[in-house]
Image (cartoon, rainbow, N blue to C red):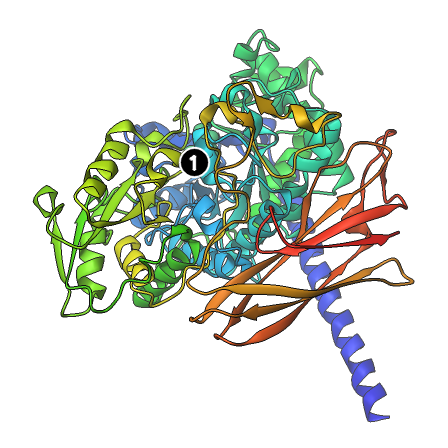
Amino acid sequence: MKGILSYAVLMLFAGFVSSAAASDNDSGNKFVRDLMKKMTLEEKIGQLEHPVIQDKTDFKELEEGVRSGRIGSFCVTKGGKLTLEERNRLQKIAVEESRLGIPLFFAFDVIHGYNTVFPTPLGMSATWNDALVEEASHYAAADASGSGIDMGYAPMVDVSRDPRWGRISECFGEDVLLNERMGSAVVRGFQGESLSDNTSIASCVKHYVGYGLSMGGRDKQYTEISERSLREIYLPPFQACVDAGAAAVMSAFNDISGIPASANRFTLTDVLKEEWGFDGTVVSDWDSVVELMNHGIASDKKEAAEKALVAGVDVEMKSDCYLSGLESSVEDRTVSLKRIDDAVYRVLKLKFDLGLFDSPYSARNDIDEGYVRELNRKVARESMVLLKNDGILPLSPRTAKISVVGPFSENQDLLGWWTGNGNQKNVVTVVEGMKNISPSNTVIVQGTEARSKAPVTVVCVGEPGSTFGESNCLSDITLSRSQVELVREVKQTGTKVIVVVFNGRPLVLDPVLDYADAVLLAWHPGYEAGNAVAEILWGMESPSGKLTVTLPSASGHIPLFYSDRPSGRPSENKYKYEGKVKASFPFGFGLSYTEFEYSGLEVVKNSDNTVDVSVTVSNVGDADGKEIVQMYVRDEVASVTRPVKELKDYRKIFLKKGESEVVRFKLLPEQLAFWNVEMEKVVEPGGFKVWVGPDSAGGLEGRFEL
Ligand code: GLC
């Protein structure tokens, strides 16, 4: 009886909780509806205005806009340097001096940290550690929230296979599943248990949608995307983030096959709001509404406003088309008051959920900075990918002297392109890290005079934060000639060469590979860069990061990614003077200081059409280590062409040397679904290949029939 009673009590409690949540929703709904009844059309349109606070902002003008109810929220840029006090002062004007006292929300690019800067998203994705990314995002949110920020414009989940595009550094790589999982980890980390918690901020997932296909890898260019590719590749990470509860979505700059993303009713309303049931707020990206005029689908700001609003953009960032045009659009019935009310409801409900009506003012959070720095170091270590090791790593404790040279050896420009509220002066350089971590008997020498005086030389190369990120695209992603020359010169002195690469995007590293005894890809790892590099080089932790983007061997091979569709004649996948195209380092690749062996793959199809896949992974090397076990699938024959491989699951395990573990995956039918000729999402019967292994190029192969 007791068991039943507890079950019944549990159900009653669950019912109470859900009804409480519903009633909270109801109370929020009622509160917002009642408030909207009091609002004028001008005040409603004011709630849709999201101007920018940047370095030259005239605060007097802003204050008047807030006081008159013509501004609903702010985009704060790094240059805006909005202090907590200034934020609360603006809020006070809104709450105490505007007619209805509707609070503002403040948004900022919390991309990979706020006061403490973590590795860039592309670097964080190389950890394949969702929980770690979620924890880092939680601390970034707590930092930002305590500084007066209510919304972070993240995660960026634009799947990209074009490293010429500088913004590939902001996403979680070329794979759909990793962008789904990592993106939703950021949403959970930002939003926590409740948006109204003072350590939470709203997640604004971006850039919806297809921005990663920007033509030629040049920023904000045309994208040609079929509905099939939208639904199979570019939309799923956004759906995962919406399913994780993302409070907002940012519409993108790019034209999607003739209809710009910020005026695209199909993506913004049919799919996002109707098919997926997204009840949050769509915020346009910077000027993307007024830029509809440049796209040539709006003749003036009024038409731009109409096209964006009707398509589904609720809040306009930076440009003022809504403010200047919507009142007359309602009067001439080009825009319905119903659509205005829908947009205003979404914004006010967001403010209600953020708790801004009850507590509009922010207060600092008590953050354990020491813990966050340690977390930063852990994420940085786990993000680093060992590409080559001829045995020089881990460094021997008997190494008497190590030179540390190169343009990034004492460089603090390791925070990526988005640097949050961070400051490069807080970055631990490689020289400092090596001095912090190295054994006392090892002398660390630095600078150019050091090159030839040590048996081991660490050469730090890469790209500065100003050569990737927004508007920073390259036609050639090969490591710079001068840095290749430096590595070659150092090698010629007879020293052992360890190349550490600080990259934002994937780079072509082939020119240095022959001169390097080891290559460690470190991305832009954030504050703890030097300490994390040193801890990896000294073997305090075995490298465990794995590539979430393909490293091509030439820029001319772009786009090159593992989950390509098959060709009718695969032998033609080549260039005339180079032969068959092959990645320099494939998706999923990363070395360790130990060896992992895969054996005993078992694939069992169950009567409910789920498939149990298991494999034994053994640590057969000389060190403890983490391994990222990856499962890929191929649909052999289907009604449309299917990728040659697709990542369907992954598991990061830790094995002491000599240990083994049976890793089990369960494949669900819906993981095998795709969009058929009629654009219906289906699972078709037939044969499937399955691989389980250390990267996308190898692994044990099995098969099953559905
Ligand atoms: C920028 C970026 C977007 C960012 C926004 C606000 O143009 O495209 O990622 O969140 O403007 O800074």
Query: How would you rate the neighbour count of disc 1 (Cα within 10 Å): few for under 14, some for 14-19, many for 20 or more?
Result: many
Q: Nearer the viewer, residue 186 or 442?
A: 442
Q: Nearer the viewer, residue 258 or 458?
A: 458
Using the rendered image of the protein, determine whether residue 560 is visible from the camera's viewpoint: yes
Vertical relation: 141 (above or below) 15: above
Tally the numbered discs.
1
Vertical relation: 670 (above or below) 400: above
Report which quarter residue 48 is drawn in. Answer: top right
Image quarter of the N terminus: bottom right
Amino acid type at circle 1 is Cys
Using the rendered image of the protein, determine whether residue 67 is visible from the camera's viewpoint: no
Vertical relation: 489 (above or below) 528: above
Vertical relation: 114 (above or below) 643: below
Residue annotated with mark 1: 75
Residue 294 in the figure: left or right of residue 118: right
Q: Nearer the viewer, residue 186 or 453?
A: 453
